[in-house]
Amino acid sequence: MASKPFLELHHKDIREYREFLLPESVDWVITDPPYSKKYLWVYDVLVEMCEYVLKPEGGLLVMVGQSYLPEIINKLSSRLNYVWTLAYLTPGGQSPYIWTVRCNTFWKPVLLFSKGKYLGKAFGDVIKTSPNNNDKRFHKWGQSEEGFDLLFDKFVFPGQTILDPFVGGGTTAVVALKRGCNFIGVDNDLSAILTTRERCQSLGVNFVRRL
């Protein structure tokens, strides 16, 4: 009988990752960091974390905004191998208007990087959610389970270990656990950790650590 997936949550600053994450212990880092310019520094930490925590064949899927896409790709390419950019489409009236470039945007880039050579599934590079399915019930920057389930379907296998260092409202956690994956979530906001734990409590997982 297959063992239950585990859920590990850390109320921590990601810059302290070596204190609570094990080297080469994660198959995928799947995350959606904040998009504004003041948070560009997180990609310097994220790429160092990925190099440390990913297994040799592991990969990174990171949803990003478009305003600083060249800078983000440059930072992540310093230690990881760029593979591809997927288009995450969110049709409907909820799509944001970017005033600086006068653009009403209906999609977000999802960057795929690998630690070594990419050896995963063949994949299509478009994900399209149902109209107006930008789920903000659990976090102001949250994404829908539907969208992340489509993303997981392209790359992730049951039994793999997933890390989201910006866990937010816990969408990545819910999708990972429903798919039989182990999940490690990190956030510096305690309310985000508590929300994630509450969403996951009914999924029959083993809580191995609660920080």
Image: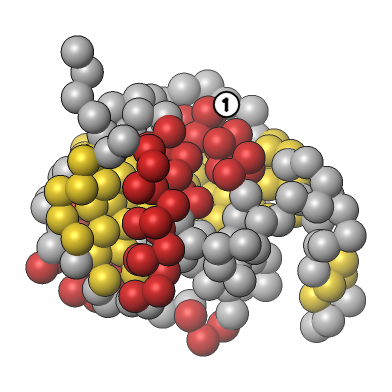
Quadrant where the image shows the N terminus: top left
Q: Is residue 115 left or right of residue 102?
A: left
Residue at 24% over, 64% down: 10
At which x and y percent is residue 28?
35, 42
Which quadrant of the view contains residue 195? Answer: bottom left
**Location of residue 202 with respect to 47 vertically, above or below:** above
At which x and y percent is residue 60?
40, 47
Residue at 58% over, 50% down: 110
Q: Secondary structure at mark 1?
A: loop
Q: Is residue 163 left or right of residue 88?
A: left
**Location of residue 65 with respect to 173 vertically, above or below:** below
Residue topped by disc 1: 123
At which x and y percent is residue 136?
64, 63
Nearest the viewer among 185 and 137 is 137
Is residue 207 at least partly visible in the picture? Answer: yes
Q: Is residue 168 left or right of residue 106?
A: left
Q: Is residue 141 left or right of residue 45?
A: right
At which x and y percent is residue 198?
39, 56
> How packed is label 1: few (under 14 Cα within 10 Å), some, or many (20 or more)?
few
Q: How is the image coloured?
A: secondary structure
Task: Specify the amino acid type for callout 1.
Answer: Phe
**Location of residue 141 with respect to 111 vertically, above or below:** below
Quadrant where the image shows the C terminus: bottom left
